[in-house]
Image: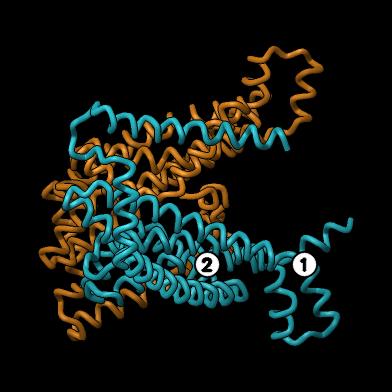
Amino acid sequence: MHDASRRRLRGTALPVLLLAGWWAAFRFGWSDSPLLVAPSQVWDTAARLSGDGTLWRALGASLARDLAGFVLGSLAGFGVGIALGLSRLLENLVGPTLHTVKQVSLLAWIPLISVWFGLGDLAKVVFLALAAFFPVVLNTFEGIRGVPRELVEVARVFALTPLQLLCRVVLPAALPSIFNGIHLALIYAWLATLGAEYLLTSGIGIGNLLTDGREHLWMDQVLLGIVIVGAVGFTLNWLAGAIEARLLRWRGTSTGQY
Amino acid sequence: MTARIETSTLPAFAVPRLPSLSHAAVTRLALSWPLPLAVLLLWHLAATFEWLPPQILPPPAVVATTFVDLVRTGELPDNLWISLGRVLAGFAAGGAAGLVLGVAMGLSPTTRDVLYPSFRAIAQVPSLGWLPLLMLLVGLGEALKIILIAKAAFVPVALNTYQGLRGVPTRYIEVARVYRFTRWQLLVKVVFPAAFPQVWNGVRYGLTHAWLALVAVELLASSEGLGFMIVYGRQLYQLDVVLAAVVVVGTVGYLLDRLLTVLEQRLLRWRHDAF
């Protein structure tokens, strides 16, 4: 316990030092750049923007978009992944194409998507769905292919119907890999939310907050935006980890007995 | 980016190998063609019968012609070299820094305790989040691109190096103790070789991320490079240029990753030969 608290203390040393340096640089006027804003000013901006609701509207818009794209993309990815995992024929037909398309940097799709779907929310959600689709498809596929042959054989012995086989044996066995894909999709989708808001600048969102701040040289708003982006990413990541741990608990306990 | 992206193994569909021309391989190869051909045919039909206006969907033949033209005029190669130069510079800088930090954190618990939390916090914010701040701090010049690409490469390399070093089995180190290895020998002969596969994984992710970051930053703030070609092609509604550039972006990304995989096999063979 004592050891852990010392480690935590060491971990805070650097951020505290940086904050102190920032504060001192402002306090003693080491730099007269207009870009150097006081730490307190960032705080004030945070208070102001959350007070008049700007921040919450932006955050809400970004998260709603994120969620919509994530759900659509993962569902599609899940479906396609199962189909590819269960059928060799489909895998051979679709796999190579999918693998090739995957190589294109995600953001490179935005210009095309903007021509095809406009600059509004539809285009953003389509892009987000694309971002979430690939990790889920690949991991679902891998998970199903990785199901041990013996499990399926046992299921055959018990004469399970194909649906029972899928729901009771294949999917549970593939679950860790599927979750891994969903976890990745959550992160990619958040990343893509930012990218979509940067490149498709219509509408509101955290990305627009950042670009606005940059265009007007509002350093405080930019810094605030970065903190929020990091915090949201962290929260999503943590949330996914927590849900995953809970849903996969049955695996942990069954192996824990040995 | 977070640890999840860098450390998880992104699965791939059957990596194409040189076909040994077995029956199964031929079948697989043959089966991989219908879908792209069908899409191409549909695309061609859509363009021919003008289901969609050509500004929105240029016919495949036009894209191919544009591609050849762009190569012949030197526009595509020029932009490609600029992009490759940037990605290599940023990747070299970020990768080297990542290796140093990863080794430092992997070997010294104190360094780890001091730096790791801050490192994770910085890594948590995606590269795109840093972009506006960097634009304000260093302007729109070349430095912006290199820094952003370096950051994208830095995180996975540092993380995987650190985890690779920490994951070296204690048994190995005990054996080395028995043989009375010096600390230097221990590092060079035991720790680094054992950590190598994961470190290399980090390098591969680093290069992939560097390429992604390059395209992003060129799309947002650049007047040359592949990303810029995409943006200005879109602004002029020349989707043929956009599509040609998108294909090149995908191909280069794929080739960079393949290159590192081949290199890895080389390096690992050397490792096996040495023992």
Which labelled disc corresponds to residue B98?
A: none
Residue B223 % position (x, y): 14, 47
Mark 2 residue type: Val
Please name the residue shown 71% across and 66% down the image: A147
Q: Secondary structure at mark 2?
A: helix
Q: Tell whether B243 sits left or right of B180.
A: left
Please name the residue shown 18% across and 58% down the image: B231
Please name the residue shown 44% across and 43% down the image: B122
Q: Tell whether B179 sits left or right of A202.
A: right
Is residue B77 placed above or below A104 in the rendered structure? above
Q: Chain of mark 1?
A: A
Disc on the earlier residue, 1 or 2: 2
Which labelled disc corresponds to residue A136?
A: 2
Q: Colour of chain A?
A: cyan
Is residue A61 placed above or below B109 in the rendered structure? below
- The residue carrying mark 1 is A250
Q: Colour of chain B?
A: orange
Q: Chain of mark 2?
A: A
Residue B252 % position (x, y): 34, 49
The C terminus of chain B lies in which quarter of the figure?
top right
Mark 1 crowd level (few <14, some 14–19, many ≥20, 10 Å Cα) = few
Q: Secondary structure at mark 1?
A: helix
